[in-house]
Image: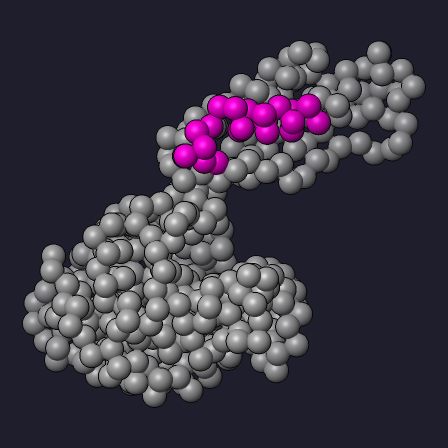
Amino acid sequence: MNWRTALDGDAILGEARDLLSEVVDLRRRIHAEPEIGLQLPKTQAKILEALAELDLEITTGDQTSMVVATLKGSSEGPTLLLRGDMDALPMPEDTGLDFASTAPGRMHACGHDAHVAMLVGAAQLLAAHQPELQGNVKFFFQPGEEGYFGAKYAIDEGVLEEPKVDGAFALHISPNLPSGMISTRAGAMLASADEVAIKVTGRGGHASSPFLAADPVPVACEIVIALQTMMTRTVDIFDPGVLTVASIQGGTAYNVIPEEVALLGTLRTVSESTRDAIHDSIVRVAEGVAAAHDCTVEVTIDRGYPVTVNDKDFVDNTLEVLDGVITETLRMPAPVMGAEDWSYVLQEVPGCMAFLGVCPPELDARVAPACHSNRMTLDEDALAIGVASHAAVALSYLT
């Protein structure tokens, strides 16, 4: 499909900046009342209130508190999905902001408050351009991105149907990029994320007589080292994976050899073939090491989000539309090993995710508190770039 690249970027950005005070106000109100998981009634209510005056067809989820608002253009054409995820993280906030979280142990530390506010701003901006649109825009406000598979629930409930979605675009803020910069890449952009649990079982006994037991503690330690050797010696460095054992749990006293030790970790890859191969290797290595020391293992690997793969044509067109028209862009040289459930949408329709730089001007982007930090903050002026980027992609795609 041909995109229209001759857009008046100054005009679009000017309209976005006119909306900035409303966008910032909404972001701050959502930030102060963070919600976790699939049911986010307060956030949903704020979204519905902000969209109430617009000519949109609005539906809400049955299994989740998602909101889908469809703007129908003046003529038939394709449908573009724009997403803003809604949920916060189960962690404390230590930013000292005037609008900091009022919910203990909950924080919008990944910028989803900004994602929602920017998408509402884009809906307001694009609603004013409805006569120009040859097709439809679906504004998809998604709960449950932080480990709850919210996108999968939404797909099951038909977010990609009626009207059928032809393309999809999402923005994710990054405090570690210069404010206002848009960054993305074709192909794998974000990694898959799987949870790995290994239970090592031996025979307990007295610490003074290890020869009468089968001590699972050194066996567990050897498995950790063997897994890292496996990763560096059997995984293609040009199709990488990262395996981190982040927890070792076992034992109750200084003089008791436990019967069991548990290892917990995470696996990240940027291709499904490497992902599957490492799964097999984890089992083989753990079983082999345990057997060598008269122990047994139980390996459980829970598959999380798949690799987020951006469509090349969609990325190329997005960068052409935004670069120099809306803002400065950067083509990422390599994937990021974080994970996103936007991957499920991109398995179904061509599209992409892009990062929006929001580093506060007083900080160095290289060392600014990152997403998931209890001290993460952002430059709210950059939200106008986000609103304009959503709008520019939609106008280019549908006009």
Residue at image point 48% right, 49% down: 338
Q: Nearer the viewer, residue 352 or 326?
A: 326
Residue 126 on image: x %, y %: 24, 77
Quadrant of the frame with the C terminus: bottom left
Kindly tell me whether residue 371 is visible in this rendering. Answer: yes
Residue at image point 68% right, 32% down: 262
With respect to residue 304, does 320 lie above or below? below
Residue 264 on image: x %, y %: 62, 37
Residue at image point 89% right, 20% down: 206
Residue 282 on image: x %, y %: 54, 25
- Does the magenta segment cover residue 22? no
Residue furthest left in the image: 75
Left or right: 183, with 27 as reference point: left
Quadrant of the frame with the N terminus: bottom left
Question: Which residues lie in the magenta part?
Answer: 221-241
Residue 79 on image: x %, y %: 18, 62
Q: Nearer the viewer, residue 359 or 298?
A: 359
